Image (cartoon, rainbow, N blue to C red):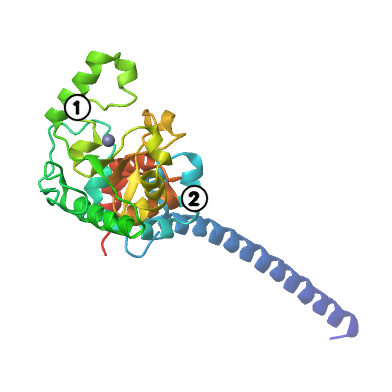
Amino acid sequence: MDMMTARTVVSAYLDSSRLAGSLLLAVSCLLASSCRSEATVTDSRTMLHPDYWLFGRDLPRIVEGLPRTLAAAIETDPRLFLEDCKPLLRERRDCIERAWPSKGLGDWAPDDLRSFPAGGILGDRPDLSLRAPALAALLSMANAARQDGIDLRVSSAWRSRDYQESLHGRYLSRADADRVATYSMKPGLSQHQLGTAVDFAGIGPAFAATPEGRWLAAHAREHGFSLSYPAGAETLTGMRWEPWHYLYLGTEACDVQRAWFGDSQRLMARYFEGQGELLARSRFR
Ligand SMILES: [Zn+2]
């Protein structure tokens, strides 16, 4: 082979290796782009939490119906949301799901009502009763309040559907229905029928400024009690501000309410009414 021929062969070889290099680059680009689309598919198949049979594709159902800002927070960290929800999916799930029943409670009645202990820390009110876990939490809260020099008194606790009906009827005989709707629930919709709601004495907006009202506003959540009708939330709840009316949900639920539901009991309860079953069913550990 002369010098010219050798140069031609080498240059042809270099050209072909450049071509091979370009081909290799093109193939790896294709692979990379297919890997990227693979990654998107994997996202929708990614398990959101190791203890739930829920995946990326389930996120729209998980956040359905929530205000955009709350949905966005869950979409950003679904694992933490599902972890926080775990204690709510056990025995107290029904307390949360029934708290704001969109279709009413009907004749539902709790089967674990307990009378207030006579002569106890809450005074002599054995005519009042609550569900067992709510009463235990209330007695413990009243003890904690007593340590701070506060005497909590209760004016109303569990009410049967029939009692609510007669109470609501009495209000309707004195005022028009639109006005009554802002302070008294129709029979079947009252949280008092749940056996987990408490009205502290005394009833009225002035309660908020009393030592008892201030103590509850600061500490009730530490004992699992959540204010049902807060000031400024009248449009959302449909009810006037009731600084004396608390609902027992448990401390974990109060934490979840604050962390994930803008501290709105109603938003959290309606969420679990809609999606609690999905979360509970999907949880396998
Ligand atoms: Zn009440």
How many other residues sit within 10 Å of disc 1, few (<14), some (14-19) or many (≥20)?
many
> Quarter-wise, where is residue 185 in the image?
top left
Q: Quadrant of ligand 1?
A: top left
**Kind of residue indicated by mark 1:** Pro
Give the SS element for disc 1: loop
Could you say which is closer to the camera, residue 221 or residue 23? Answer: 221
What residue did someone put label 1 on? 187
Q: Do we see residue 53 in this rendering?
A: no
Q: Which residue is mark 2?
A: 73
Sort mark 2 into few (<14), some (14-19) or many (20+) by Cα contacts within 10 Å: some
**Residue name at image x 29 percent, y 44 percent:** 247
Q: Position of residue 16 (x, y in %)?
A: 74, 71
**Quarter the N terminus occupies:** bottom right
Answer whether residue 161 is visible to the viewer in this image: yes
CA gap, disc 1 and disc 2: 36 Å
Q: For residue 274, what is the image quadrant? A: top left
Q: Assign the C terminus to one quadrant of the image.
A: bottom left
Residue at the spot x=18%, y=28% of the render?
A: 164
